[in-house]
Image (cartoon, rainbow, N blue to C red):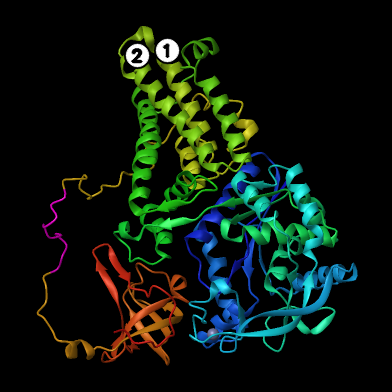
Amino acid sequence: MPFYITTPIYYVNARPHLGHAYTTIVADVVSRFHAMRSEEVFFLTGTDEHGDKVVRAALKEGMTPRAYVDRISRLFRDLWPDLNVRPSQFIRTTDESHMAVVSRVLQRIYDAGDIYFSEYEGLYCFGCERFYTERELVDGRCPDHQTEPETIRESNYFFRMSRYQQWLIDHITAHPDFIRPERYRNEVLAFLREPLGDLCISRPKSRLTWGITLPFDEQYVTYVWFDALLNYVSALGYPDGERFRTFWPAAQHIVAKDILKPHGIYWPCMLKAAGIPVYRHLNVHGYWNVDQGKMSKSIGNVVEPLQMKDTYGLDAFRFFLIREMTFGLDSNFSEAALVQRLNSDLANDLGNLFSRVVSMTHKYFGGLVPEVEPEMGRQYGLGLGPEAQRTIAEYELAMNGFELHKALAAVWEFIGRMNKAVDVSAPWELAKKKTTLKQLEAVMNSLLKGLRLISGLIYPVMPETAARMQKHLGLDPDAPFYVLDDLRLWKPVPAGTRLPKSVMLFPRIETDTPAPGTAPAAAPSPAAPEAKPEIDIDDFRKVDLRVATVLHAERVPKARKLLKLEIDMGERRTLVAGIAEHYTPESLIGRQVIVVANLKPAKLMGVVSQGMLLAAGETAGPVLVLPDKTVTPGTALR
Ligand SMILES: [Zn+2]
């Protein structure tokens, strides 16, 4: 059976953050799960690149829209390998093939009579060159210009969405899991109780040219949502592509709750009007609230959570995101919660079990997996066989229903039973007597089987750890060891397999956070540097601190620590920074930094550095200081 999963295509007016990473990791996890079932999988992600917000973001950076979208789109594309996310395709709405599909679908709906020309009246800010809704205004004024917008009328094209309202209500009612979890289905149905208006799908070229020209009126470009949603079919080669025929009927989308309405209402109506069957499921998740107060090693920027993967390991980061969030609800992201999960679920439960069982195999059998007679296996197998089947069934059900946290909970329940089985069977006692040797062999064999199963089941979330476990069970980590039908067979690690020496899968993180109630509030932090003498404001003003955008970054040849940066600080400058051991050049491009602009130029390894980057001097390495929001390059700090 084919399986098709999509993330939203991400809007390029901002850089990737935790929310994007979460959605895309979820898509990767379910893709890998469906591959475990030997299904044909297609996983699509990409970027949404048209519209006035992109034009304004580009202008702010002094770039053309084309150059700007190329840059930000690359940041997204380059992030996925870093997160071990493997999409089948990365689509951009500026791709020619996508633009051709948008024209084609527009023409089709237009010919069918579902697009009409009419006047639109709204609140327009001439400074921003855009319409505002009442809700976007602050005290009735444009938030950027502090002026009252004017009511203007404009002629535009409209999609007759209202015609499909009853059809959509019927469809959702007949397919209870069309939108899931249920709370979002209810939200869409509640919205549909009110009359559904028609959708304005054009923008006159007099105020926006960065878009797809309407095929039936070249004075207009397509509204960005109408353009973007069609990526889900254009990527498959709609209408005649082989992929479209194979994968479209199995389509599932993943979105965050803020874009429920376009995906739950506009999109099905568009599909219906275009004569395309609707998708199968819309899977909606909540928000991550980033608890900045608890990000001790970080600097309170929304990008920071992504750096936790470097601090604690990618698999631990992926595990935390999938295990911590109940799919559909909001969740809190904090470093403390991540460390807590790492220590308890990964280091303690899984890591200890693994190293215990592998070490005992070494201790009692010289690292060779013992041979077991079937009868002994049944008698002394600790009952793990039936537990394994129950676990697989629960896991599969939860994965299919997009309850990924529950799938992991089922695996951890099994891990808990395994740990208990070790304690109850006490192999160290069985090893003391010759008469219990057969029993010891059966116990160890069953425990190794259990580890083999666990390595398969954690594969979608922690592919690297899964392969590592395989390797340390003496099995081929490159073989598709995670095939679900195979796991159901509850196969032993073959007798005679030699296990490599035991390994620590997840080292415990020592936390220096004192237990609640014991914190001596007045005690100075041991890391606090000695205070410097007071200065007055004039001394401070001598330092010219400015925000800059990194345009380009590369390593300085033969210098382990140095990066050469081209920055935009209102003017272009070259800087040399000693951060190469902690930041890759790619991770810096497009980011904003703080620069001491009036530092005397200095020559480092033959390169003249015209200024200095600000970083917090952590013992673990420098941590760059970034502005909380994007600001115009060259802006002074006060
Ligand atoms: Zn304005």
Question: What SS does tag 1 mark?
Answer: helix
Magenta segment main secondary structure: loop
The percent coordinates of residue 459 (x first, y second) are: 53, 42
Foreground pick, 321 / 581: 321
Foreground pick, 52 / 526: 52
The percent coordinates of residue 413 (x first, y second) are: 46, 30
**Quarter of the image where ligand 1 sits:** bottom right
**Quadrant in which the N terminus is drawn:** top right
Give the numbered dot on residue 171.
none
Instruction: Tell me, yes or no, whether the highlighted magenta stretch contains residue 319.
Output: no
Are circles 1 and 2 on residues that touch, CB within 8 Å?
yes
Give the numbered dot on residue 430.
2
Q: Amino acid at mark 2?
A: Leu
Q: Magenta residues, as a range?
A: 519-529
What residue sits 54% from the left and 53% below the top? 25
**Quadrant in which the C terminus is drawn:** bottom left
What residue sits 31% from the left and 68% below the top? 623
Q: Is residue 28 visible?
A: yes
* Extreme residue toward the left, this view: 533
Foreground pick, 523 / 452: 523
Mark 1, other Cα within 10 Å: few <14 / some 14–19 / many ≥20 = many
What residue sits 43% from the left and 18% below the top? 443
Please name the residue that numbered disc 1 is placed on: 439
Depicted 270 relative to depicted 208: above or below: above
Specify whether 397 is left or right of 508.
right
Depicted 581 relative to depicted 632: above or below: above
Query: Which callout, 1 or 2, points at the residue further toward the start of the chain?
Result: 2
* Extreme residue toward the top, this view: 435
Question: What SS does tag 2 mark?
Answer: helix
Q: Amino acid at mark 1?
A: Gln
The percent coordinates of residue 349 (x first, y second) are: 38, 34
